[in-house]
Amino acid sequence: MDLMKIFYLNRTEDESGVSGTGRVAQGFIFDNGKVAVTWLSEHPSVTVYDNIGEVHAIHGHGGKTEVIMEPDYKKAFGELKSFIDNFDLCEIAKTKIPVDGNASKLMSKN
């Protein structure tokens, strides 16, 4: 199952002089592939497209505007939480210090 994705349009050159440069629009790609885009300008309209290819074809301006996908923060948080929940510093330390060293003896007392 696909999840809704968030993106923005980053423009390096403004051919029309209307939207400016940098982050000029935000958008969503819905689960069904439809796309909604809103402009971050003084005229913030919202347009719906059939797919992200249409957005790129209409607003890409020959590579002067790039579609930048935002990270999936919820997924990244889940991956990080899973790592932390399963992280055992003592077990890792035991593999890195000499078995007969003082640090190893200290750890075995706890």
Image (spheres, rainbow, N blue to C red):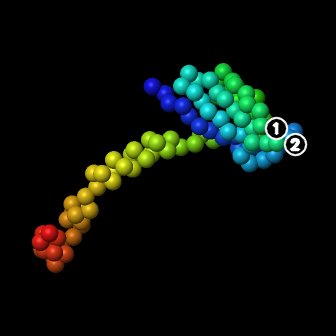
In the image, residue 12 above or below residue 37: below
| Left or right of 37 in this view: 2 | left
Q: Please name the residue shown 69% across and 24% down the image.
A: 49
Task: Look at the numbered disc 2 and give the secondary structure of its residue.
Answer: loop
Q: Residue at x 76, y 29 (%)?
A: 58
Q: Which mark is residue 17?
A: 2
- Looking at the rendered structure, the kind of residue marked 2 is Gly
Circle 2 or circle 1, nearest the eye? 1
Seen from the viewer's position, the closer of residues 11 and 87 is 87
- Whole-percent x and y of residue 14? 83, 43
Quarter of the image where one finds residue 20: top right
The residue nearer to you, when weighing 17 against 56, is 17
Q: Which residue is mark 1?
A: 43
Q: Is residue 18 above or below residue 103?
A: above
Q: Image point 21% across, 70% down: which residue?
A: 97
- In the image, 86: left or right of 55? left
**Classed neighbour count for the residue bearing mark 2: other residues with Cα under 10 Å, few (<14), some (14–19), many (≥20):** few
Tell me whether the residue at label 2 lies in contact with that at label 1, contact meaning CB atoms closer than 8 angstroms: no
The answer to whether residue 62 is seen in the rendering is no
For label 1, the crowd category at 10 Å Cα-Cα, with few meaning under 14, some 14 to 19 and many 20 or more, is few
Between the residue at mark 2 and the residue at mark 1, the CA separation in whole angstroms equals: 13 Å
Callout 1: SS: loop
